[in-house]
Structure formats: structure tokens, C-alpha cells
Image (tube, rainbow, N blue to C red):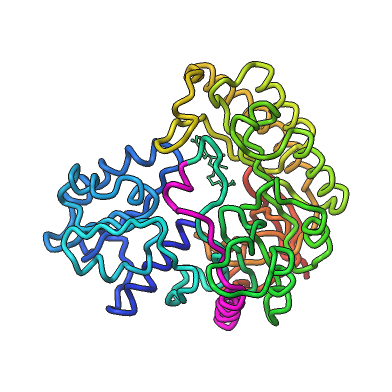
Amino acid sequence: MNVRDSEHMIAELNREEPYTLTEELREADLIIINTCSVREKPVSRLFSEIGIFNKHKKKSAKIGVAGCTASHLGKEIIKRAPSVDFVLGARNISKINEVVAKKHAVEIDINYDDSSYAFGEYRTNPFKAMVNISMGCDKSCTFCIVPATRGDEVSIPSELIVQEIQKSVDAGAKEVMLLGQNVNNYGKHFTSEEDACNFTQLLQKISKIDGLERIRFTSPHPLHMDDEFLQEFASNPKICKQIHVPLQSGSSSLLKEMKRGYSKEWFLDRCAKIRNLCPEATISTDIIVGFPGESDEDFEDTMDVLEQVRFEQLFSFKYSPRPHTKAAEFDNQIEKEVASERLTRLQSRHTEILDDIMDAQMDKEHMVYFDELKAEGRVSGRSDDGKLFFVHGSEELLGKIVKVKVNKTSRGALEGTVCA
Ligand code: SAH
């Protein structure tokens, strides 16, 4: 979502002035740091980065801080780092030209409604389109700062979404990644007069776009994975067979403390349903270890879900107490060492599972959509089920979906040869 937000900033800036991107800090007239605030680490890095940029930048160059940390720290950023020229919240991107023009402007209203705003066009990669379908979040997970930085959930009108995808298809994209904090909650919060349209219906509408061949989305919420949605996921040939099902914890009592709205049993049932309806689908997840009050038994529940579902991809984090969240106030915080041990155990076991999964890919054939030129005459792309592929080839492969046979496996990616 942050990558797409950055593209929106560039597009909006380009409406006023023809900016180009530079890798050279000294050449830049404008430096924007687009920030995350989900965990503490990136926030603490922000101020050291500002210092480095300020030291090496052109004298006249402006520095702006955007994104979720901008939303939650606001003018505090300029107080701590006066070299910052403006602060632009995650929910205020359409105002970028206004804040660039004003010294020390701070725009961080999290209730600002951009949902019907047609952003300018800019894509880092013309073959892969990212398209927002909603803004903000309507959940109140006790660990999560996102509702405080991105505001309430608002669904973007489906017409606007279809239009934007059509534009990207006309420009060469065959694949779209739909973005939202809870994509499958789509349609609950329109702010303009709209015909009812839930996520399943949105997927059906999008599938009708000629020339669009692949649809991906992130992140869906396990709570909203009803049968209708899973049926559509399994049966719609344009929907890529890769699904993110963020677990957070395998313990039903901890899930309650987290206010996730589902139990271990519901989660396992949904994953079993996915495996059953669509055996070729890959499932990825997010897990937090060391959430306040996590007992050994709670953690064993998480390990148990890992064993049962055998996720193809795992994003795992040590719990990080965040401002504006309920869990940061809980008085049963877990010791860092315990959380670290659990994270290591979880990740090591997942690595073993992943090695088995990837080793079994040898000699398999996949349809791969190539979208990036790499060094040393290689091209990369993804299979329908989301596996990263590298083959020897040239730009001729870009934007094409071709059959590839795996001839080398590793944990993170597969190598192969294009089938004749
Ligand atoms: N709305 C998305 C979450 C975006 S944040 C979703 O529900 O999937 C991405 C991930 O960061 C979360 O899924 C969670 O695993 C992790 N995360 C969020 N807050 C955290 C915190 N306080 N400490 C550690 N990890 C956290």
C-alpha cells in the first residue's frame, strides 16, 4: 500500500511539475520519506534518515515526511527535525502539491475522504498495476496502529476501480493487485451514493475487463472469508491462486484479546476449505509472537496451526507496543527474550516446511507472468500461485505469460527454462 501511495504522490506532483526520479541524493530537489508505523523500528529509523538526507542534500532541496508515521507524529516531526519542510499523512496524499508549496505545512487529517478522488497516473512497473479498493480500516485489533493513522474504512466506488484498472491494462498490464486493509470487507462503507457491491461482486466485475488476465489482492481478513467469496476465489480463472490469510495467533483466547473476531477453529476451517476447493492454491500468513499474555500453550497453538496449514509464506513479527493501541496498555507484556525465542522457533520450523514445499517444485511446470528485467540477462516473474521465478531471457518476455519448467529450486525463488 505504501508503494502505491508513493506512486500516487509522484503522479500528483507531475500534474504541477515534471519531476523525474533520481538515485542520486545530491541531485534531488525534493526528498520524500514515505513511512510505515506498524512496528517501532521504522519509526526510530526515520529521524536518523532525515539527518543523513539533510547532511548530503542540495541546499535548496526540500524534505517531506509522508505516510503513517507522518499521520501519527504530525508536527512533532518538524519540532524534532526542523530540516523537515512538510508532513503529509497517509490519508492526505491528494494534497501533496499544497504542502510542497507551503513552508512547514502539516496535513494529517485521518478522516479526510479521498475515496472518489481520481489520482493522476504513474506506475513504477507498467506490467503490474496496483489499485486501491478501500482506504482506512474498520477493525480495532488491539495491537494495530493502522486505524489511528489511516482512519475509518471507506470503500472506493467500483466504477472508479474498474476505470483505473482499464487504464493500466491499456498501458500494458495483464495483472492487477487490489489493495486495502481488509479487501474482502469491500462495499460496507461507501461515502457516495453507490449500488450495493461486495468484494465477490467486485471481483466478478473486474474479471470482465478485456485484456486483464490476472487478479491478486491483499490483505483479506479471515473473518470475512465466507463461502461465497472462497467459491469465487476457487472458480474464477482470472483470480490468482494465492491467498493471504493473516493468522496473528493460533490461540483462540489470544485472538479474543487481539479482537480479531475469529477463533483458531474458524481459521483452520477456512484454510481447510481453501485447500479443499482449490488444492493448487498457496496460503501465506502473518503471525505475531509475544503478544501480551501469550503463554507457552498459546504459542503451541500457533505452532499447531503452522503444522496443520503448512503456509507457503510466513511474515512473522515480534509484538511491538504501539501508541494509540489498547494492547500497549496491557500489564502482562512478554519479556523480549521469550518473544525472541518463540520467533526463532517459529521461523526455523517454517523454513523446514518451506524447503520441503520448494524442493517438491523440481521439474514442475508453471505459467509465469514476466514483469521485471534483472541483471545478467535474467527476467523475473510470478507463477499464478505467487512463486517467484527467474529465467534467462530478454525484455521480449516482459508482459507475457509463458510456461516455464523448474530446473533449480531454492527457499525464496525458482529457476527454470521457458517451454517451447
Ligand atoms: N490490515 C492488515 C494488517 C496490516 S499490518 C491485515 O489485517 O492483514 C501488517 C502486519 O503487521 C499485521 O498483519 C501484523 O501481523 C503485523 N503487525 C501489526 N501491528 C503489529 C504490532 N504492534 N507488533 C507486531 N506486528 C504487528
The quadrant in which residue 80 appears is top left
Q: Is residue 175 above or below residue 25?
A: below
The x and y percentages for residue 146 are: 47, 47
Kindly identify the residue that appears in the image at 63 percent across and 57 percent down.
Answer: 183
From the viewer's perspective, tell me whether residue 107 is left or right of residue 164: left
* Main SS of residues in magenta: helix
Q: Is residue 149 magenta?
A: yes
Kindly identify the residue that appears in the image at 32 percent across and 73 percent down.
Answer: 13
Q: Is residue 16 above or below residue 253?
A: below
The x and y percentages for residue 37 are: 41, 44
Note whether residue 396 is visible: no
The x and y percentages for residue 295 are: 62, 17
The quadrant in which residue 420 appears is bottom right
The x and y percentages for residue 221 are: 66, 48
Q: Is residue 255 above or below residue 16?
A: above
Kindly identify the residue that appears in the image at 55 percent across and 24 percent down.
Answer: 290
From the viewer's perspective, tell me whether residue 403 is left or right of residue 287: right
Kindly identify the residue that appears in the image at 20 percent across and 69 percent down.
Answer: 101
| Magenta residues (range) | 145-173
Q: Nearer the viewer, residue 313 or 12?
A: 12
The quadrant in which residue 411 appears is top right
Q: Exactly how many numbered labels are in the figure? A: 0
Q: Nearer the viewer, residue 323 or 417?
A: 323
From the viewer's perspective, tell me whether residue 75 is left or right of residue 236: left
Residue most extreme to the left: 59
Note whether residue 268 is visible: yes
Residue most extreme to the front: 193
Q: Is residue 170 magenta?
A: yes
Q: Is residue 316 above or below residue 227?
A: above
Q: Quadrant of ligand 1?
A: top right
